[in-house]
Image: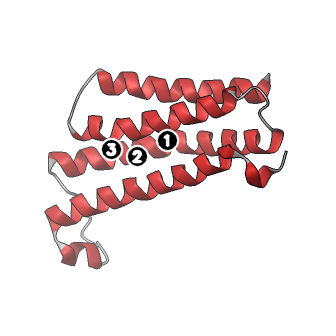
Amino acid sequence: MEVASSPILVLLALSVALLVFHISLQGMLATKELGSQWNAGPRDDAREPVGKLAGRAARASANYRETYPGFVALALALAVAGDPSGWGLVGAWLWFVARLVYIPLYLAGIPYIRSLVWLVALAGLAIMAATVIF
């Protein structure tokens, strides 16, 4: 198996795009609330957006970044070790899709379902880890 042709690496690239989307969404909503001068400036005054949507975007982004290093490590391990069963790829897709669905759920303030989707993402990481270990 060639590492460069691994579909896991495609998901890894997509996960970076999702990270950039999180950062962009957070920045766009904060700028909408605090203004472009705040965004362009040095932000020395430590102002933070207080609006619900900007706050939710910031928390959703922080939540993504909490599990992201684990995803990257497991994806790289799967790409290097190979995944003949395909379960690692299933877990990676599960994590990615759940993290994608999580964004609008968090922005809309939907409880419980959002937590369930987070658990699905965690299950995806567990499947990836089990594939690497076993």
> Which quadrant is the N terminus positioned in?
top right
Q: Is mark 2 on a helix, strand or loop?
A: helix
Residue 73 image position (x, y, % from top left)? 68, 43
Q: Mark 2 points at which residue?
A: 62
Q: For this rendering, which residue is in front, 94 or 36?
A: 94
Q: What element carries label 3?
A: helix
In this picture the colour scheme is secondary structure
Q: Is residue 11 above or below residue 28?
A: above
Give the quarter of the image for residue 56. top left
| Residue lying at 38% horizontally and 21% vertically, measured from the top left | 116
Report the residue that reaches farthest toward the right.
1
Position of 34 compared to 78: left or right?
A: left
Q: Which amino acid does label 2 sit on?
A: Ala
Q: For this rendering, which residue is in front, 91 or 130?
A: 91
**Sequence-first tag of 3 and 1:** 3
Q: In this view, does 54 lie above or below 94?
A: below
Q: For this rendering, which residue is in front, 128 or 2?
A: 2
Residue 93 image position (x, y, % from top left)? 55, 35
Pointer 1 with pointer 2, Cβ within 8 A? yes
Rounded to the nearest angstrom, the CA distance separating label 1 from label 2 is: 6 Å
Q: What residue type is labelled 1?
A: Glu
- Is any atom of residue 95 visible in this view? yes
> Which quadrant is the C terminus positioned in?
top right
Q: Is mark 1 on a helix, strand or loop?
A: helix
Count of marks placed on residues: 3
The 10 Å Cα crowd at callout 1, few under 14, some 14 to 19, many 20 or more, is few
Position of 37 compared to 63: left or right?
A: left
